[in-house]
Amino acid sequence: MLLMVMVFLLVRNFEVENNVELVAAVFIPFVYLPYIGTNSKYHFHGNDYWKKYPKSTGREWLEALVFAVIAATIIRTFFFEAFVIPSSSMEKSLLVGDYLFVSKISYGAKTPITPLTVPFTHHTIPVLNVKSYSEWLQLPSWRLPGLGSVKNNDVVVFNYPDGDTVALEQQDISYYRLVRSNGRAAMKSQGSDPFKNPEQAYNIGRQIIDKNLTIASRPVDKRDNYVKRCVAIPGDLLEIVNQQVYINGKPLKNPDLMQFSFQVEAPSGISKKVLDKLDITDIRPSEAVNGAYDIHLNNYNLAKLKSSGMAGEVVPVISPKNQFYPDVFPYNPAYPWNVDNFGPLNIPKKGVTVTLDSNSIDLYDRIIRVYEDNDFKRLSKNEFEINGVKTNQYTFKQDYYFLMGDNRHNSADSRLWGFVPDDHVVGKAVFIWMSRSQNRSFPNIRFERVFSFVNSSGISKSYFWVIAIPLFLIIFGYNKRRWILEKLGR
C-alpha cells in the first residue's frame, strides 16, 4: 500500500492525470515508470505542480488522509507497532488485554514481503473475515540495521513459524499438529505403529485434514504474531531439567512471575474471593484426584495460597525424565523429551555445519525444506539429497532462536514446534501503554500496568501517574491561560 501511494505521488509530479495511466503506474510501476522516464512527453515538475494545482475541500481532506496513512504505515513498518496480548501463554508477566508497543528498531525492521495489503490489517479484514492482502506482488525481504540483537530473556514478537499453512476452521491449532494427531490416530485404528513409519502417518493425516478443512497458506509477514520469551540464542546449548532451563550448562534466570501447574488438594473448594485476591485465573478440577484442582501458580500466589488455609497438599506437576511425548518437538521417540525435561539441543547458528542421520534429520528437516527453501529428499535411512546433490551435511543459512512462554504449562512454544528463524522475528516488546481486564468493572483498566516497561524479569512498575499528572497539569494550564487571555480580550 505504501509503495502504491508513493508511486502515485511520483507520477503526479510528472503531471500524469489520465486515470488509466494512473492505474497502470500504481499496479505495474516496473513497466510504467521506465516508460515515462524515457518519454519526452513527460517532464518532472516537482512540488511546483502541487502548489499551482487547484484543490477542493474534499481533495485537501483526501491528501491529509493519504499523508496520515503514509506516516502511520512508515512508523508501523519500520519503527514501532502496537500489539495486544491475545492469550495467556505469558501470564503473569504479560496478561491478556495488555497493549504493547513493539520496537522494530531494536533488532532491525524487515522490509515488507507482501506490499499489496489493506492498511492497518494483518492477514484478515475484521468483520468481513476475508484475506486482507494479495500475493500478486511479493518482494524479497531484508533486515535493516538495528540497535542490537536478540538476547537471552528478551520478550520477542515474531511470526508464528508453523503458520505458513492454516486450517481456517481451527486456526488456534497448528495445522501440522492436526496432521500428526489425525495420522497417528488413523494408523493406530488400523493396528499399525505410526512411529515406525512416521512419513506414512503424516501423509495419511494430511489427506484427512485437507479433505475435511479449508486450507490456506500465508507468506512470512502475514503469519500470526506471537509473543514469547527468548530463552536460547544461536549457538546456545539448551537443556530443560525438571522445569529449570539451562543454557550452556548454567541455569537461566527465571522471570519473576513465571508459572507452572500444581495439583492442589482442597476438598472444601476454594472460594472465588480467595481466587480473586490471589489473582488466580487458571483453575480446573483435577482429573486424577478427587477433591483436588489443577492450578497455574507463580512463586508469589503459591506462597499466599499455602498460607490462606484453604489448600491442603500442593504438588508440582512435572513430567518425568526420559518420557516421550508425541506432540513435543521433534516428534521422534529417539528424543524422549517433554515440556519439563527437554534436550540437550544445540540452537542452529548461521554458518554452522551439522551432520544428518536418521535421527538428527527430524531436528533440521523443516529448516532445510521450508525456512531455507531447499529441494530436499530422503533417499534412504542415512542418505539425503539437497538441491540435487547427495550429502549427509548441511550448513545453516540464517540464525535461529528458541522461545518459551512464561506460563510454562499453558504455552504453545518452541518445545512444541521447534526453532524460530531470524527472518520471522518482528521486534522486541518494550512498553505497555494500556491494559484492560474483562474481569474488572468499568472502566476495566489495570492502572497498575499502564505505562510500564517490559524487561528480562517481567515488567517495571507503572509510570502512569508520573506521566499522567504532569500531562494533565500542562493541558489544564494551557486551557486556563487561554481562558484568562480571552477574558482580557487578548
Image (cartoon, helix red, strand yellow):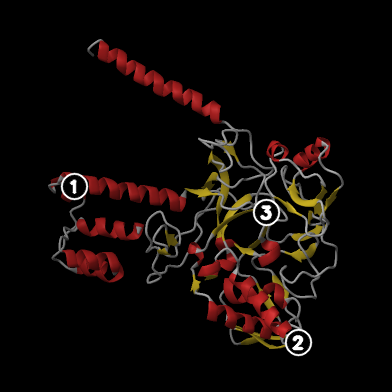
Q: Residues within 10 Å of mark 3 (few under 14, many from 20)?
A: many
Q: Which mark is residue 191?
A: 2
> Alpha carbon of mark 2 to alpha carbon of mark 1: how far?
71 Å
Q: Which mark is residue 213?
A: none
The answer to whether 432 is drawn above or below residue 224 in the figure is: above
Q: Residues within 10 Å of mark 2 (few under 14, many from 20)?
A: few
The answer to whether 473 is drawn above or below residue 151 in the figure is: above
Q: Which residue is mark 1?
A: 58
> Alpha carbon of mark 3 to alpha carbon of mark 1: how far?
49 Å
Which corner quadrant holds the C terminus? top left
Left/right of residue 133 with respect to residue 388 in the rendered view:
left
> Contact (CB < 8 A) between labels 2 and 1?
no
> Alpha carbon of mark 3 to alpha carbon of mark 2: how far?
37 Å
Who is closer to the viewer here, 91 or 441?
441
Percent across and percent down for residue 348 are 68, 66
Q: Which residue is mark 3?
A: 405
Residue 176 visible at all: yes
If you read the primary sequence from the N terminus, does the residue marked by circle 3 or circle 1 appear first?
A: 1
Q: Callout 1, which amino acid?
A: Gly
Q: Residues within 10 Å of mark 1 (few under 14, many from 20)?
A: few
